Structures are given as structure tokens and as C-alpha cells.
Image: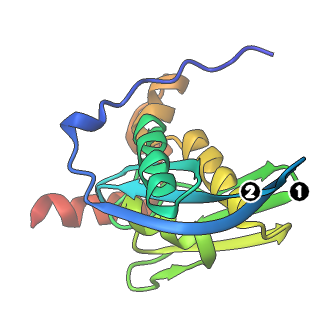
Amino acid sequence: MRKKQSTYINPDQLNLHVERVIHTNRVSKTHKGGRTMSFQVMVVVGDTDGHVGVGLGKARQVPDAIRKAIEAARKNLVYVPRIGSTIPHEVEVEFGATRLVLKPASPGTGVVAGGSVRALLEAAGVHDVLAKLVGSRNPINTAWATMKAFRSMRSPEQIAQIRGVPLKTLTPWYVRKFKDQVEVS
């Protein structure tokens, strides 16, 4: 299977002001002399303008694990296409035993999601969306499933370009109406 080309997003050019710890886990390794405790932390970073990343960090102390997770999240940034305050289309992805469904919602609905999915959507700046998790609700797997969903999203402009059709024939009437309202104001 061919791997898709991913574009690198430089974190130094963005204002990634949202940093949120979504999961911590105390892990131990048994040696001959006893147990060695360490902490695993998952962190979300974002700029609430469509850029979001997630990373895992592991260290003997929690602050070191958080620092490592933030560095990993900054290297793992993706762009989330949005139409107004919602996502452009419905998306359904599987990651391990986790199945995630994200649906666009009308303005004023809010983020109807829980756990790490909510943290990622808020860090990306999506304000109106419906989410449903089916299967495993492990916070780490749900975060990776959400990132996979973000990578699979396309804006209407990208789809029109791929298909070679004008944008007006592709987008539904409510999207055109919303875009017209945004352009007028």
C-alpha cells in the first residue's frame, strides 16, 4: 500500500497556545532489584485556527513526560479544514478497536464529544460538531483515531479540484449560503 504524501507544518510559524494533557498513565518495569516507575503522558497542542497535534511522552517524572509529549505533538501537526465553525463533511475512521464518526453540525450546536476527541476538536478550533465513539474508548486510541479523521478530511475546494468540477456544483446549498454570509460581513 502506498503511503500518502504528508505536508510538513512548521510549528515555529504558528501560535500553538493550547496545550492540554489528555491522559496520564503510571507504568512500571520490573527489574532484578525491584520496580522502576515512570509516567506516560499524552498532550494535545493547537492554535484554534485549524492546526492541531498530539504526542506521547514518557519519563520518570511527570513534568519531563509532559515536555517530551509537547515536543512530539509539535512534530505531529495536521491541518483541519473547516467551513465556518464546523467540519466540511462526515468522516468515519477506525484505529485499532476504536471506531470514530464525526458529523458536521449547524451553528450553535457546540462540540458534542467526550474525552480526547473533544480536546482535539477544541484545540483545532472546531466549535460545532457531533462525534460518536464505537468500540474501544481508550483515550490514546481515540486521540489517534481523531488525528486519522483529521488527515482524511478534504475541503470542498480540494474535492472540486480533484474532480475537475466547479465548486458551485459540488457544495450543498447550505454551505454556499453560509459562505455568502461570511463574505458579506
Closer-to-camera residue (172/78): 78
Q: Which residue is mark 2?
A: 141
Q: Amino acid at mark 2?
A: Asn
CA distance separating discs 2 and 1 = 8 Å
Could one spot residue 104 in this view of the protein?
no
Could one spot residue 89 in this view of the protein?
yes
* Label 2, residues with CA under 10 Å away: few <14, some 14-19, many ≥20: some
Image quadrant holding the N terminus, namely top right
Could you tell me which residue is drawn at 36 percent across and 55 percent down? 46
Circles 2, 1 touching at the beta carbon (< 8 Å): yes
Mark 2 and mark 1 lie on one chain; the one further toward the N terminus is 1
The residue positioned farthest toward the left in the image shown: 185
Could you tell me which residue is drawn at 48 percent across and 54 percent down? 88
Residue 105 at what x, y percent from top left? 51, 74
Element marked by disc 1: loop
Could you tell me which residue is drawn at 56 percent across and 55 percent down? 89
Numbered disc total: 2
Where residue 97 is drawn, which disc sits there? 1
Q: Amino acid at mark 1?
A: Ala
Could you tell me which residue is drawn at 15 percent across and 57 percent down? 183
